[in-house]
Image (tube, grey):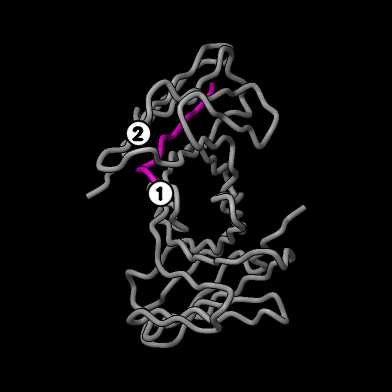
Amino acid sequence: DQQVKQNSPSLSVQEGRISILNCDYTNSMFDYFLWYKKYPAEGPTFLISISSIKDKNEDGRFTVFLNKSAKHLSLHIVPSQPGDSAVYFCAAIQGAQKLVFGQGTRLTINP
Amino acid sequence: SQTIHQWPATLVQPVGSPLSLECTVEGTSNPNLYWYRQAAGRGLQLLFYSVGIGQISSEVPQNLSASRPQDRQFILSSKKLLLSDSGFYLCAWSAGSGNTIYFGEGSWLTVV
């Protein structure tokens, strides 16, 4: 039972344009959502998070949007840079500190 | 500041051999500790988590086990490795009241 889904395994975006990474979830009890970025052979690094009581959180080039009615969140990166090429995981948490991860989306920024 | 380290970074082991991956966290006390695995082409799978010394919860039945002999030490073990155990293993921690989980550098395990 995949409670957090990233339906796009890969995404290619031109440098300078906006990258939009999407994530859907099924458990309405999730109360906190996070995005992680992962380079090959490295551990994921935390990027940005959002509480379920908010619908938007912004940090520099990164903005996360949450649509609770649709059980959907998205990560916007603007402008996209070559160093943003990585695998991005969305994750959700409910209470007891256990993160549930999506399958990941590989983002490639083309020069 | 808090840091997390896991080792070894890479490991090649024959089928049937034992496994021990170690993880330590510095700069915090009583962290929640986790072991994740990322298999090729798949997402991150939670294997074990621990909220305190000697308290281990297993998420997926398998031939792996975890132990927490000290507050900031988490060990992933196997008595006999299988080919399917190959993957990228990640140790992680979070504060008791925090919502964010922080990951170690990861360990590549290849079972041959």
Q: Nearer the viewer, residue B87 or B76?
A: B76
Which residue is pictured at 32% across the width and 69% down the height?
A83
The quarter of the picture where residue A47 lies is: bottom left
Label 1 vs 2, first from the N-terminus: 2
Disc 2 is placed on an element classified as: strand
Image quadrant holding the C terminus of chain A, namely: bottom left
The quadrant in which residue B62 appears is top right
| Residue ranking furthest to the right | A1
Q: On screen, B23 above or below B31?
A: above
The amino acid type of the residue labelled 1 equals Ala
Q: Which residue is mark 2?
A: B6
Residue stretch in magenta: B103-112
Q: Residue B102's spot in the image, x, y percent?
A: 39, 51
In the displayed structure, does residue B108 sit left or right of residue A72? left
Q: Where does the image place residue B101, in percent across and percent down from the top left?
A: 44, 52
- Up the image or down, B7 lies above or below B20; here it is below
Residue at figure coordinates x 60%, y 74% from the top left: A22
Residue B16 x %, y %: 58, 12
In the depicted structure, whether residue B68 falls above or below residue B44: above
**Residue in the image at 50% along x and 75% along y:** A12
Please tell me how crowded label 1 is: few (under 14), some (14-19), or many (20+) other residues with Cα within 10 Å.
some
Task: Tell if the residue under mark 1 belongs to the same chain as the one under mark 2.
Answer: yes
Name the chief secondary structure element in magenta.
Answer: strand
The percent coordinates of residue B92 (x first, y second) are 43, 43
Question: Could you say which disc has been placed on residue B95 in the image?
Answer: 1
- In the displayed structure, B16 sits above or below A43; it is above
Residue type (three-letter) at the residue carrying disc 2: Gln
